[in-house]
Image (cartoon, helix red, strand yellow):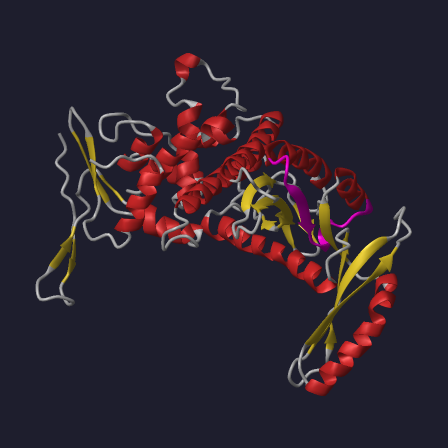
Amino acid sequence: MIDRTRQTVLFEDNVPKPVHVAFDAESLSSDGGVTLLSQLDQGIGLTRTLLVALEDRRHPGKVSFTYDELIKQRTYSIALGYEDGIDANELSRDPMLKLAVGRDPIADPDLASQPTISRFENAPSPRELIEMGRKLETFVIGRLARRHRKAKVVTLDFDSTVDPTHGKQQATLFNGFYDTWCYLPLLGFISIDDEADQHLFHARLRPGTARCYRSVMPTLRRTVAEVRRKFPRARIQVRMDAGFYHPRVIEVLEELGVVYAVGIAKNKGLKKLSDDLMDITRAVAEKHEDTEATFGEGPYKSRSWKTERRIVFKAEVLHYRGRKLKDNERYLVTNRVRMRPENVYNWYCGRGDSENRIKELKHDLAIDRTSCCKFVANQFRVLMTAAAFVLFQELRWRLRRTRAARSSVGKLRGMLLKIAARVVTSCRRIVCHLPRHMPWTDVWQVAARKCGARFA
């Protein structure tokens, strides 16, 4: 038997006594709060719902890890900040992650390593991932319908973002606007009445040169139909920026009978509509030496439109010290005919909060870590990241009456999940020892109760 000597680290200058640091503690984890996510997931059935779309084609006698364990391990790892598959080599021994997946933290074998995770990510077919994406949509809409049974307004916001690639992934193409090789994921968010939160319900990876409106029309048809089933009395609203504008998109929105506001790029016809108001605004900006904005409206019909529609515009002149005034016109096509132009524009600008959700997805959960060779495998990663985000959204909703109500994903992770824990098992129970002086103990206990925990 090999007797290994553990080397320690010594610090001598900072405190009166020498400080020795040794990595020799057993059954410790830095992710003690992951049990919150696993309990929450078990209660709402998110990963279980997504798993229905996958068919396990492996030989039963050669399987060490079920698909249920693998999708939980990968989703929880992403939620904890371990976005790369290679992280599984070290995480496979983490006692708290093993417990979250459903294994004994000490006695049971380790979780899957990177090669198994990679095979899992490459296993689903395109059809299975399409079905998984649709199950994510219906799951989120269904959860919101159970919370808001008397909802009056349901708002859908769509946005795209750039996902730079740095390898030879399938369908990564050079986009001249972003000046990089990339993917262009499409993300959909849903909000209810005056709620501040925009809930992610759709995440689809697209090639780097895809037009913004690619795949939007079938998604709109499917989503509006599902929303009408779940919210039969609610008015449906849709907001999209100018990148999504296309005559056929406007026609589909009108066919679906929804309220909409879609940005539209300026052209000669639109400039003619706003020229008079721009002249007035420019004169006021010159007089006051400050940025000025006024709002107007007018009828407009392009060559590709079958009928005349309402255009709402913002005539804005930007003032920068020491520089010339800069015109900044913005145009919307909308079917909101009874609302003042300024109110229509302010309502449309509310869609900008989805940018904060995208920042969380990219900075806190690395939804843009699409480094697999196959396009389909990268789409699977996007969906598992979206699932992790949905778990955080559910957790944030349960904390809506606490001081963590408006915390970002990164903040929630640091507060409630990244906690040192010592795991002790016996024949009767498993005890997870968390720090006595953890600063967010009250919030953690509220979250635990809301996720179904019982306190002895």
Q: Quadrant of residue 77?
A: top left
Up-down: is 335 above or below 36? Answer: below
Closest to the observer, 427 or 176? 427
Front in this rendered view, residue 403 or 74: 403
Q: Position of residue 383 (x, y in %)?
A: 53, 37
Query: In the rendered image of this protein, does residue 425 appear above or below residue 354?
Result: above
Magenta region: which residues? 231-247
Q: Position of residue 280 (x, y in %)?
A: 80, 78
Place of residue 399 in the rendered image (x, y in percent of width and height, measured from the top left): 39, 47
- Residue found at x 67% / y 33%: 225
Which quarter of the rendered picture does the N terminus lie within?
top left
Residue 131 shows up from this direction: yes
Q: Residue 282 at x, y = what percent?
A: 77, 79
Whether the magenta-drawn stretch holds residue 15 is answered as no
The residue lying furthest to the left in this view is: 17
Q: Is residue 239 magenta?
A: yes
Instruction: Report the side of 197 relative to 432 (left or right).
Output: right
The one of 210 and 295 positioned closer to us in this rendering = 295
